[in-house]
């Protein structure tokens, strides 16, 4: 038993836990998120363009049912683009609020 403890006791543990380095794979995760955001914006643009075309052509031909579907797709694409574009800002703001609350500690009125 003593030899077993000595063998592992001499190995120094080198751990760097500074928050400046980020987490392992942060670059890959950021790349994946950037690509997903691009795909979301491309899908929203496609929905906006196709929905607008269907809406316009359906109104011209007198097909109001398909015109309503085209309008829904066009507005959905616009809303999707807005949400996708604002997602990083929303996440950063919410994470900033949680960090500010946790760093401040309890206020005197909490007691």
Image (cartoon, rainbow, N blue to C red):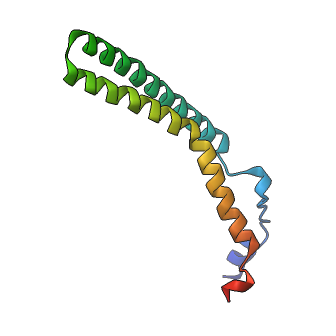
- Can you give x and y, in whole percent of width and height, for residue 41 in the image? 50, 28
**On screen, residue 105 above or below 84:** below
- Residue 34 seen by the camera: yes
**On screen, residue 66 above or below 83:** above
Towards the viewer: 49 or 38: 49
- Can you give x and y, in whole percent of width and height, for residue 47 in the image? 39, 24
- Can you give x and y, in whole percent of width and height, for residue 110 in the image? 67, 84
Q: Identify the residue shown where x is 57% and y is 35%.
A: 85
Q: Identify the residue shown where x is 52% and y is 35%.
A: 82
Q: Identify the residue shown where x is 74% and y is 69%.
A: 103
Towards the viewer: 29 or 36: 36
- Can you give x and y, in whole percent of width and height, for residue 36 in the image? 51, 34
Q: Identify the residue shown where x is 58% and y is 40%.
A: 86
- Specify whether 30 is left or right of 50: right
- Specify whether 9 is left or right of 62: right
Q: Which quadrant holds residue 51? A: top left
């Amino acid at each position: 038993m003593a030899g077993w403890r000595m063998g592992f006791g001499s190995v120094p543990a080198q751990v760097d836990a500074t928050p400046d380095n980020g987490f392992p794979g942060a670059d890959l995760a950021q790349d994946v998120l950037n690509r997903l955001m691009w795909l979301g914006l491309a899908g929203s643009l496609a929905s906006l363009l196709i929905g607008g075309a269907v809406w316009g052509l359906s109104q011209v031909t007198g097909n109001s049912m398909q015109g309503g579907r085209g309008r829904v797709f066009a507005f959905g694409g616009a809303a999707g683009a807005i949400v996708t574009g604002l997602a990083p800002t929303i996440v950063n703001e919410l994470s900033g609020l949680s960090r500010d609350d946790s760093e401040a500690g309890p206020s005197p009125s909490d007691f």
